[in-house]
Amino acid sequence: MLQDVALRGQVERLISRHSPQSAQAPAPASSPEREPDIAPPPLPKAARLDGPEDDTPEDVTAALNVWWRRHQGDGPFEDALLDRLIRHAHQDRDGFAALLRTGIADHLDWFSQAGHQPWNPLGVAAAVCGVACPSSGSAFDTMVEIRGRELVERIQRSVTPPFPLATATHDDGTIEAAELVARIAEYERLEIEPGPVDLAQALLRVVPEDDPDARAAAKALTSPVGRRLADRLRTGGRDTDPAAYPEPFATLLAGPEPTEGHSPVYTRSVFPCRPEDLPCDPDIQADWAWYIARSNGAGMDGRALERLAALPGPEGEAMHRALAEGLSDDRREHRAATVDALVIMVSRGELDSARLAAALGGLTAPVASRLSSGLRDASATVGARAVWPVLSGLLAQLLPSVARIHGLSDPLALATDLAARAGACGEIPGLTEVASRPPKSRLVKEARQLHGVLAGWRRAGSAVAPPAFSRGKTPPSLSAQLVRLPARPSYGKPNRSTGATACCPLSAPCRTGRTAGRSS
């Protein structure tokens, strides 16, 4: 038996040495067709957030109680509730305060004894009623609470604005350009200056639409605030200098690198910004999310990435880096949400295959099976052509350096499937070298499969699909030269074709002079 195993190894080495084209597989006549183009799923449109008609003070009081029981931490709900509170406080503060003292008496009593000032809708309602809190703000305030703090300070100075400027008009956090122009025009008419934080978030939320009427109306505004909005709509971009914005926006827009813990935003453990707070800057939010996840040793929040991917702003390097982290996360539900984010980016035309491949290759401890699973799921939705450039770019980084990551055979197996479906015929650096090794491991076998598929498409000029080899089998050109080596020895068993008993794994005469039909 030992002699037979040694003979098998000698034959394999001789064939590998003298058959440089053995990794290529010819395309058979009956080859499957290339996968048809798959249109990515349509993107859901952002829903408009219209306030209730004929909103009364009683309705706002009831909404405060609903918020207390069910919606604390719900950014869009709190955003709309702040708007309703300020509107009624501006119209009739005394009457509204009297109604609040009756409708939310228990909440106000709790508020007066709280250990810290909650600058949420309850804090604004307490300021309207003149109820003081014995403490100051928290370092863990969300963006709604940061805005609430500014509103409370203005209410305490009896400078209640008619409404907040930064209230979103759509559920993705954006503000319609025409709506913001109308709000600033009303501020100009009343000769009221907006709060710095409220104005900054409004300018960062407005989408510079191609609306000539909105641009013309903005150009007619006379205040410095109006001219700033007109510039934003005309240029389509925000101020490049983060210092043009108050805190916390100056720190957030500058990115995580300069932060040394001296900002009012406690970024090292809690990111105060929800995706809908900065809808035009998803890349900045992804940069912070990646930084905080790395700083805390936590995984990437795939559900947050899914929401970021759907925002209207451009998605650059930081978003692709966060996407790579999400695809390698050890929690299945977050990996699934990251795949949804990838699909959304493909639908929006924002996916940069080269960037994502580079980010995947730069992971410190990637698990190839996780990456393969996510890319396979994405290809089922958006098609192989959208995913193949990502995977081929990743393999181009790993194969030349013979990088050792756990389960590299899985990406190679997926690449074979994607290449066959996409009609890929390009070269992948390092693939030929791996495929030319003796087929003693699954890694080499999968590399040979992929090499054969790509070569088949090149010979066919990408006109027909390459052969779809089943997993674990040798490509046909190798099988012909290896004389159909079985997967494992079957000593003492009759040969199916000759009926003879084999003394070695070969089922045809070998070059040593022994025959497959001679028993030992």
Image (tube, rainbow, N blue to C red):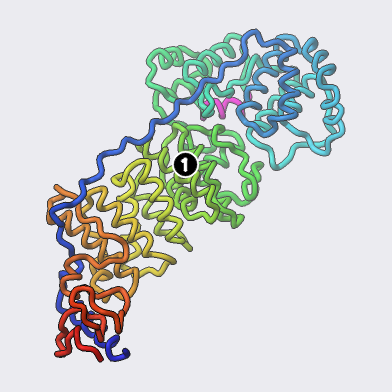
Name which residue lies at 70% across and 13% down.
Answer: 88
- In the displayed structure, would residue 290 be above or below residue 81? below
Specify the segment rendered in magenta: 195-204
Magenta stretch: includes residue 200: yes
Q: Which residue is mark 1?
A: 283
* Residue 123, image x, y percentages: 76, 28
- In the displayed structure, would residue 406 be above or below residue 489? above
Pick the quarter of the image with the N terminus. Answer: bottom left
* Residue 21, image x, y percentages: 15, 69
Residue 326 visible somewhere in the drawing: yes
Residue type at the position of mark 1: Asp
- Is residue 290 found left or right of 16 in the rendered image? right
Tell which residue pokes out farthest to the front in this image. Answer: 499
Q: What secondary structure prevails in the magenta region? A: helix
- In the displayed structure, would residue 392 be above or below residue 146? below
- Is residue 142 found left or right of 211 in the rendered image? right
* Depth check, front residue: 353 or 163: 353
Name which residue lies at 42% across and 40% down.
Answer: 315
* Residue 399, image x, y percentages: 32, 66
Quadrant assignment, res 349: top left
Name which residue lies at 75% across and 37% down.
Answer: 137
Quadrant assignment, res 446: bottom left
